[in-house]
Image (cartoon, rainbow, N blue to C red):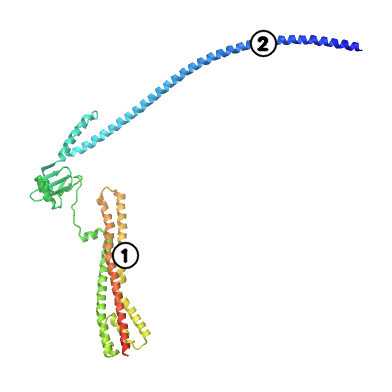
């Protein structure tokens, strides 16, 4: 048995040894094949890398060349864009300059034409026209900036035309001298002139005729001779009130009514205060010399507030003191209505007058804005009516309100003093009568 096992083991070892040798040969053969493949693939990879590097280098060279071409094209495009922009700018400047030159030509020809200077303008050659304009303008400025005299005609205040010497002070003022009238000249419209109502300018005109510039000039400067300048007229009180419109006249009428009421109340208070003191003394004398009946007889024919208060006092002298004082206070209160006559009306006028002035101001401003809306602000004369109403009515309202308010308060204080004097006279009469009892 052991022998069999040993033989089996020996056979196994021999078999495995032969197999291992064959495997090694197979592995060696396969390894050699793979190594050959690796070497071949490595060579091919190296060849491909070299080819790719060569192509990549060539492509980079071509790309760099293309980039340079693109940069050159971009630079050329930017330069062309700048040139185009400058060309547009130059074209716009040329257009603007042409329009400016044409405007200067138009303004110059229109400005020089009234002075008899005609300038021919050639659209293809503005340089000669500009030189001609500057030359004529310098000559005209030199002529207009001097003091010069010439024969001419002008109008006087009555509308008649006079011939004489016209002295031009540059191009801003004129003086006219003739045997009939002399003085400063102002535009009368359509290039004509008239003598301005400024008597002090006559001496200036004579001095300028003699070229005497040693004294100050009474000069009237005008802007242009196409627009007529109205003479300055002194406004009368009627004109001032009339410029305030219907509201101005209402304020004036209220002021006259307030003045009339103040005069009437003043006359009444003068009469009441002048008779109060004498009447009180005479009544007290009659009472002390005689009796109550004689004093009442004395006051029988007397009229006025003081007489009525004293009568009421005498009729109740026999009553107790407190009752008599109540009667005196009641009598004075009853007479207050007469003493305060027209006082409230005067104060109401003083309060209403400035309110009417404010109403006129608002009305005038509304009229002014209506005119501005329709005609604009080009002509100040159109706005003068509304502004006159706005300002004059306020002025009239204050002129009426201030004195009427002062007079009204003074008269009210005067009436209070008259009442105090009546009360004092009645109490003095009571006191003296009680002393005699």
Residue visible at 88% across and 11% down in the picture: 6
Residue visible at 91% across and 12% down in the picture: 2
Looking at the picture, how far across and down is residue 436, in whole percent?
A: 31, 89
> Residue 63 vs residue 272: left or right?
right
For mark 2, give the secondary structure.
Answer: helix
If the image is split into quadrants, where does the N terminus sit? top right
> Residue 272 vs residue 172: left or right?
right
> Residue 77 vs residue 244: left or right?
right
On the question of residue 300 being in view, the answer is no
Task: Tell me the tag on residue 55.
Answer: none
If the image is split into quadrants, where does the C terminus sit? bottom left
Residue density around tag 1, few if under 14, some if 14–19, many if 20 or more, within 10 Å: some
- Residue to which mark 1 is pinned: 352
Looking at the picture, how far across and down is residue 300, in whole percent?
A: 27, 86
Looking at the picture, how far across and down is residue 132, in whole percent?
A: 19, 32
Q: Is residue 27 above or below residue 434?
A: above
Q: Is residue 371 above or below residue 301?
A: above
Residue 77's image quarter? top left
Looking at the rendered structure, the number of numbered marks drawn on it comes to: 2
Q: Nearer the viewer, residue 240 or 272?
A: 272
Q: Which residue reaches farthest right?
A: 1
On the question of residue 13 being in view, the answer is yes
For mark 1, give the secondary structure.
Answer: helix
Q: Is residue 147 above or below residue 80?
A: below
Residue 122's image quarter? top left
Residue visible at 28% across and 65% down in the picture: 402
Q: Is residue 161 above or below residue 328?
A: above
- Residue to which mark 2 is pinned: 35
**Mark 2 against mark 1, which lies toward the viewer?**
2
């Amino acid at each position: 048995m052991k022998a069999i096992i040993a033989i089996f083991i020996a056979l196994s070892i021999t078999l495995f040894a032969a197999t291992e040798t064959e495997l090694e040969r197979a592995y060696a053969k396969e390894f050699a094949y793979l190594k050959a493949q690796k070497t071949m693939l490595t060579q091919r990879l190296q060849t491909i890398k070299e080819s790719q590097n060569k192509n990549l280098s060539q492509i980079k060279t071509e790309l760099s060349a293309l980039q340079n071409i693109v940069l050159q094209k971009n630079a050329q495009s930017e330069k062309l864009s700048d040139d185009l922009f400058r060309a547009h700018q130059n074209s716009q400047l040329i257009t603007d300059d042409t329009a400016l030159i044409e405007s200067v030509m138009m303004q110059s020809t229109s400005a020089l034409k009234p002075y008899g200077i005609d300038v021919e303008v050639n659209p293809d050659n503005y340089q000669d026209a500009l030189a001609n304009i500057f030359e004529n303008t310098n000559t005209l400025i030199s002529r207009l900036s001097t003091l010069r005299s010439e024969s001419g005609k002008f109008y006087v205040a009555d509308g008649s035309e006079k011939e004489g010497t016209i002295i031009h002070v540059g191009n801003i003022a004129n003086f006219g001298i003739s045997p009939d009238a002399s003085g400063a000249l102002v535009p009368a419209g359509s290039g004509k002139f008239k003598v301005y109502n400024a008597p002090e300018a006559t001496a200036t005109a004579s001095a300028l005729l003699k070229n005497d510039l040693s004294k100050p000039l009474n000069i009237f400067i005008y802007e242009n001779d196409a627009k007529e300048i109205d003479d300055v007229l002194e406004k009368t009180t009627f004109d001032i009130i009339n410029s305030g419109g219907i509201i101005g006249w209402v304020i004036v009428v209220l002021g006259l009514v307030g003045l009339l009421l103040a005069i009437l109340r003043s006359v009444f208070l003068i009469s009441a205060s002048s008779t109060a003191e004498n009447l009180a003394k005479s009544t007290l004398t009659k009472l002390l010399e005689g009796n109550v009946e004689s004093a009442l007889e004395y006051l029988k024919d007397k009229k006025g507030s003081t007489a009525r208060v004293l009568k009421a006092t005498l009729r109740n002298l026999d009553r107790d003191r407190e009752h008599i004082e109540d009667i005196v206070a009641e009598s004075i209160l009853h007479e207050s209505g007469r003493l305060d006559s027209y006082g409230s009306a005067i104060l109401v006028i003083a309060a209403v007058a400035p309110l009417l002035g404010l109403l006129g101001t608002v009305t005038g401003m509304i009229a002014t804005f209506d005119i501005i809306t329709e005609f604009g602000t080009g002509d100040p004369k159109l706005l003068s009516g509304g502004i006159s109403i706005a300002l004059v009515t306020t002025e009239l309202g204050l002129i009426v309100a201030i004195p009427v308010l002062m007079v009204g308060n003074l008269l009210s204080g005067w009436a209070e003093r008259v009442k105090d004097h009546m009360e004092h006279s009645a109490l003095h009469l009571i006191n003296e009568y009680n002393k005699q009892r």
